[in-house]
Amino acid sequence: MTSTGDSLKIDSLTIEGRTFPAAAVLALAGRYGLMPALVKEIVIDQAIQDIQLSEEEQAEARDRFLQANQLQTPEQLAVFAQQRGLSAEQLLDLAARELKLAKYKEDTWGAKIESHFLQRKNRLDRVLYSLIRTKEAGVAQEIYFRIHDDGSPFDELAREYSEGQEAQTGGLIGPVELSVPHPALARILSISQPDQLWPPTKVGEWYVIVRLEKFLPAKLDESTRARLLEELYSTWLREQVEAAMQGIY
């Protein structure tokens, strides 16, 4: 392995006296299923190649990297780099790479977050609900009437009759995003009012009795924004890697 300038150039790789030319290294990467990971990193490098960092940003990125990896001396940094087949300078460049990637994400998709949020909001809304499920239609109907007509406590009947893990919590589930429950159940919850009890409904192999306890609308706060930004980036990166892999094979 040889290094030229600020970039790493692999002419060959020698392991225990055996030398592998660069083409053989790539062939081995493909054989062992490592090619997608390699392609992903190349895609990222190409995407961020024009991103510039100020001296302050570079120093901040390097300090965070050193702290995260508990590298307090040049000697520790040199050993850490050697274990990864890099020079100390190249290793610190990886620290700057993370910040460059963060800036690339913001520059590329930051302005699209709000519209993406509006498209996804109905799946990001959260619900707290109570559920009883059984495979017996007659049992489900009886439970429903006991809750609706007789005022029997939902949680007590859930502990006694529900056949899922929710029996341990008195039927209470959540809060969870509306993308989590079965689609049929999610549709019911999405049009429910708090405390609305639904009669037995067939969902897959189960007859379910469900009651919405609380609806928690999604908000575009800092954590949601970061999640959606990562979601847009991950979708783009997956598409880029898939396209590149089709070109390789």
Image (cartoon, grey):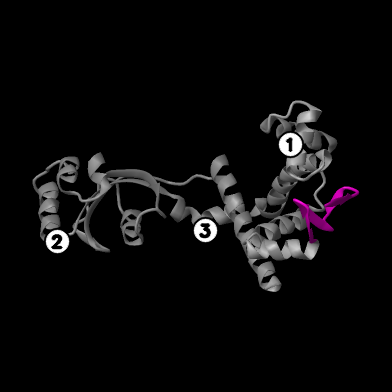
**Which stretch appears magenta?**
1-21
Q: Residue at x 67, y 32 (%)?
A: 68
**Mark positioned earlier in the residue sequence (1 or 3):** 1
Tag shown at residue 80: 1
Q: Residue at x 44, y 55 (%)?
A: 123
Where is residue 114? Give x, y as percent. 58, 52
Q: Residue at x 70, y 61 (%)?
A: 39
Tag shown at residue 119: 3
Please give left or right for residue 249 compared with residue 223 in the image. Answer: right
Kindly tell me whether residue 28 is visible in this rendering: yes
Say which residue label 2 marks.
137
Q: Mark 1 or mark 3: which is in front?
A: 1
Please give left or right for residue 146 compared with residue 18 in the image. Answer: left
Residue nearer the viewer, 137 or 145? 137
- Which residue is most to the front? 17
Other-residue count near label 3 (Cα within 10 Å), few / some / many at <14 / 14–19 / ≥20: few
